[in-house]
Amino acid sequence: KQEVTQIPAALSVPEGENLVLNCSFTDSAIYNLQWFRQDPGKGLTSLLLIQSSQREQTSGRLNASLDKSSGRSTLYIAASQPGDSATYLCAVSPDSNYQLIWGAGTKLIIKP
Amino acid sequence: EAGVVQSPRYKIIEKKQPVAFWCNPISGHNTLYWYRQNLGQGPELLIRYENEEAVDDSQLPKDRFSAERLKGVDSTLKIQPAELGDSAVYLCASSLWNTEAFFGQGTRLTVV
């Protein structure tokens, strides 16, 4: 059974720092992996989607990498800003049916 | 283009009472998902529709939960009777077949 783990559960860093959020999964046979952002009281916003054949995806200050063989993905945030404060969740799809299996998320606080 | 719309945003009910949530997906999206998210956890899939057909309801507690998607557009999720453990955020998402899903803002349910 696929399990997705995100460590740490919470992270607080000063504004301007570069940071890395981690996601690990137990079964390397995934179809794709996706990173989401969730703000309090709001829904989930997709940030980056990496297909199983890809190694990384970039969007602005965000870069997500995927290492299927080791069952790991990282989300790199450059030059963090207070507006980046949110909970970041990763989710994997085991097949093309887009049934997402989720991590519990990392709550990120960027201090001004 | 409007996103996924859910109502109500918040609902407080007493245990043993019924409750219903409504979701209007993005126009043209044939696949609709209902998720439940407990505090500090990732979302858990309850049911997935393709058009009017529920293609995956294995995680739906069928003794008290029911869902319908008439005409393959809007969907309702019902709980009857509600229990204290049902307190959570209920998220609706939609997609075009098995492509990337877009999430609504969710309904926060509190059962007292």
Image (tube, rainbow, N blue to C red):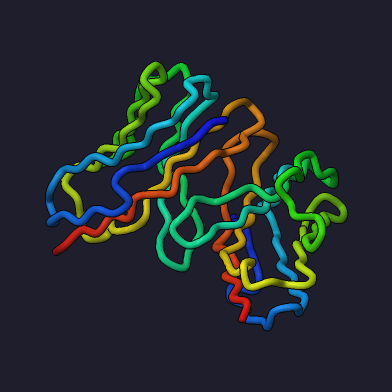
Q: Position of residue A15 (x, y in %)?
A: 14, 56
The image position of residue B23, as x and y in percent, is 70, 61
Residue B32 percent location from the top left of the image: 70, 48
> Which quadrant holds residue A62?
top left
Q: Residue at x 47, y 54 (%)?
A: B41
Residue at figure coordinates x 44%, y 28% from the top left: A50
Instruction: Mark yes or no: residue B28 visible.
Output: no
Q: Is residue B77 above or below residue A100?
A: below
Q: Is A92 displayed left or right of B46 in the figure?
A: left
At x 55%, y 51%, the residue is B43
Quadrant where the N terminus of chain B lies?
bottom right
Q: Residue at x 48, y 24 (%)?
A: A51
Q: Nearer the viewer, residue B83 or A99?
A: B83
Image quadrant holding the C terminus of chain B, namely bottom right
Residue A101 or B96: which is nearer the viewer? A101
Instruction: For residue A74, say whether it is visible.
Output: yes
Left or right of A105 on screen, residue A42 = right
